[in-house]
Image (cartoon, rainbow, N blue to C red):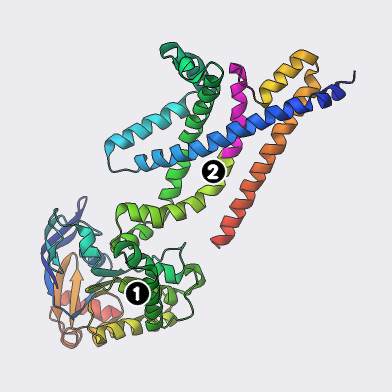
Amino acid sequence: MISVEDLHKQFGDHQVLRGITTRVQPQEVVVVIGPSGGGKSTFLRCLNGLERPTSGRIVVVGQEITNPKTNIVNVRKQVGMVFQRFNLFHHLTALDNITIGPRQVLRMPADEAESLARSLLAKVGLSGKENSYPDQLSGGQQQRVAIARALAMRPQVMLFDEPTSALDPEMVGEVLQVMKDLAREGMTMVIVTHEMGFAREVADRVLFMDDGCIVEEGQPDALFAHPQEERTRVFLSKVL
Amino acid sequence: MNAWHTAFVQLPLLLHGLLRTIEFSLVAAVVSVILGLIAALCKLSRFGVLRGISTVYVEIFRGTPLLVQIFYMVFALPSIMPLNAWFGQDLYPIIGVSAALALNEGAYVTEIVRAGILGVDRGQREAAESLGMTGYQTMRHIILPQAFKRMIPPLVNQFAQTIKDTSLVAPVGVVDLMYQGQITVAQTYAAFSIYTVVAALYFIVIFAVSRLANYLERRLQIDQR
């Protein structure tokens, strides 16, 4: 589903990613953990072309996005993204936030897009909020609308960039629950998070990233219980 | 005859001038918003040529006095091309001053529009792009609607400025409120009362417009909590 080979990313003199190589299988849930500034978000943002890699090769849903001839729009249509700060469109209602992608990008008829949006709002537990504007919703509700917005494109893969980091603690659970449901349905997901309990429960594989490299990866139980690398041990002892 | 009575008798003429002032202001406002939008999009474009053209436009029109621009349009350009013949002796000065006003205001509107677009959070663009929206779709459906909301108060303020600026069409002999004032004073010698009425008429219109700008600004702050 996703294949990354020797991915490098540099901001000026700063090496953010120094040779990332990994694969994500269909229906796999990969959770990326690690200290802040370790390159996790940059890695995720390279996967749908929000950041342009300095070098390396990325193939997502069969399209090589590092090839300049690839139309990035065709990749993004099939890759959903959920942001830390939700990034809902402030001037649109919850319903319109969800329908705008299918309508503008997929040219879906208005009534079809609307019934899709209603069913997605129901799925994330927000029936009745169709006409609310983002500013009238809590953080947890906004993030669930944002997930519904991404799902409306019927993506092959979902990317989550610290989806609960900007939430009040009591709202984290409702967002993680929606993500667990998605994982159970077989959605392919790459998740950057600091929620270790969630990572352990949902991940098929955990990547520990630090200093622009994948330091260690493995099954969650093995990685959390018996980390092989010193850096992983130090990090886990701080966050667990 | 009492000077204030003179001013009162001349009021219909002055109101006719005020009407022309408002017409010039509205034309300049509409055209300048269109110009400003185009120039702002050029200024934010990835293409250096467009950015260059837009920058030169803004700098020239903000860097020279409007009165000079009006004289340039009405007297300088017709001396090198037959604009008066094309548009007619009577019509061309009106077109010329309107163009000068619109181009001048457009340069200021460009900066308002640019600031409005840049004021929209970067995350909005990223979210739109991650849905697969094109640059055009993102601008049209996501960025501009939010930018316009922020731009309304400064645009209305700029409109108040435009109304004041239109008085500079009088020196080239185009009829507006200021010109009617000058003509009326020349005929009646009631300079104090007539110019007081002229100033009062400008003040009423401009005060109303800037009150509107303040009101819209407060509304916007409430909307954004």
Q: Residue at x 24, y 64 (%)?
A: A76
Chain on which label 1 sits: A
Q: Secondary structure of the magenta portion, mostly?
A: helix
Q: Is B20 situated above or below B222? A: above
The answer to whether residue A169 shows anywhere in this view is yes
Q: What segment carries the magenta color?
A: B159-175
Q: Look at the numbered disc 2 and give the secondary structure of its residue.
A: helix
Q: Please provide percent x and percent y for residue A199.
A: 26, 82
Q: Please provide percent x and percent y for residue A168.
A: 44, 76
Q: Is residue B217 magenta?
A: no
Chain on which label 2 sits: B
Structural crowding at the residue carrying mark 1, measured as other residues with C-alpha within 10 Å and reported as few (<14), some (14–19) or many (≥20): many
Residue bearing mark 2: B155
Q: Is B193 situated above or below A177? A: above
Q: Which quadrant: the C terminus of chain A?
A: bottom left
Q: Residue at x 51, y 71 (%)?
A: A136
Q: Which quadrant: the N terminus of chain A?
A: bottom left
Q: Residue at x 89, y 21 (%)?
A: B2
Q: Can you tell which quarter of the image residue A150 is in?
A: bottom left
| A38 or B139: nearer the viewer | B139
Q: Residue at x 40, y 66 (%)?
A: A88
Relative horizontal placement of residue B44, taking residue B109 as reference (left or right): left
Residue bearing mark 1: A147
Q: Please provide percent x and percent y for residue B122.
A: 37, 56
Q: Look at the numbered disc 1 and give the secondary structure of its residue.
A: helix
Q: Label 2 sits on what residue type?
A: Leu
Q: Can you tell which quarter of the image residue A57 is in?
A: bottom left
Structural crowding at the residue carrying mark 2, measured as other residues with C-alpha within 10 Å and reported as few (<14), some (14–19) or many (≥20): some
